[in-house]
Amino acid sequence: MTKEKIQGSVYTRRYVYNFHYHLIWSTMYRYQIFADKKLANEMTDMLQMIAADNNIAIEQMEVMPDHVHVLISFPPSKAPTSAIKALKGRSAFIFLKRHPEIRQSEYWGGHLWASSYYMSTFGSMSKEVAENFISNQKYNAYPKKTKKN
C-alpha cells in the first residue's frame, strides 16, 4: 500500500512541509540603485547564491529599482527571521564590499537596505479551509480496536 504524496510539498526524512513566504524589502531611503540593470542582475545572482548556501528555495524573484520581491520556501527547522537575515544581511555585506563607492555615499549611511520588511505566508490551503478542516475533526475518528475472544 503506498501513500499519496501531497502535491507541492517537500518531503524529507523528518518532515513534510509546504511553506511559501512573500518577502519584500527596500533600499535605504528608497534610493533606486537597481535601476542600473547590471547592478540588478548582480543582486539577483547574489541572492540566488545566498539562498542556496542557506537552504532557501527562491521560487520567484524580482529586483526592482528600489526594492526586492521574493517568493521563498525553506524547511520548518529555519526561523523566518533567519531567512530574512541571511538574504538581507549577507547581500548587503557582499554588495557594499564590491561597491565601496555606495557605502561611502553620504546618503547611504553605510547601509544598503532599510531595516523594515514585509512578509506574508501562505500554503496550499486558505486559512478558512484549514479552520474548517480542524473544526470538523472528531476525537474518535477511528473505530476502537477490540480484542477477539
Image (tube, rainbow, N blue to C red):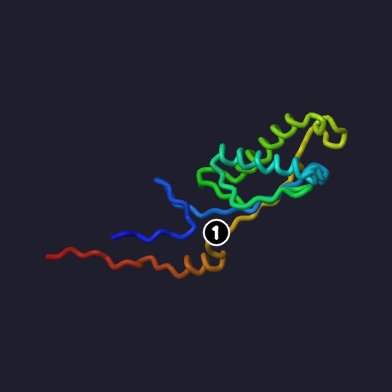
Asked whether, in this view, residue 128 is left or right of residue 14, the answer is right
Which one is in front, 136 or 77?
A: 77
Residue 103, image quadrant? top right
Q: Is residue 3 above or below residue 85?
A: below
The residue shown at (54%, 53%) is: 19
Residue 82 placement: quadrant? top right
Q: Residues within 10 Å of mark 1 (few under 14, many from 20)?
A: few
Which residue is painted at 64% across and 43% down in the image?
A: 84
Q: Position of residue 62 (x, y in %)?
A: 69, 51
- Which residue occupies 77% across, 31% down? 99
97 relative to 80, above or below: above
Depth check: 106 or 100 in front? Answer: 100
Quadrant for the N terminus in the image: bottom left
Q: Give above or below for 119 relative to 42.
A: below
The residue singled out by tag 1 in the image is 123
Seen in the image, is 66 located left or right of residue 70?
right
Give residue 91's position: percent from left, percent from top: 68, 37
Residue at 35% x, 67% y is 140
Q: Can you see residue 130? A: yes
Relative side of 143 to 78, left or right: left
Where residue 47 appears, as percent x and y from the top left, is 65, 41
* Residue 82 visible: no
Q: Is 134 on the left or on the right of 21, as rendered?
A: left
Secondary structure of the residue carrying numbered label 1: loop
Type of residue at label 1?
Answer: Gly
Q: Position of residue 58 (x, y in %)?
A: 59, 48
- For the C terminus, the image quarter is bottom left
Residue projecting furthest to the right = 106
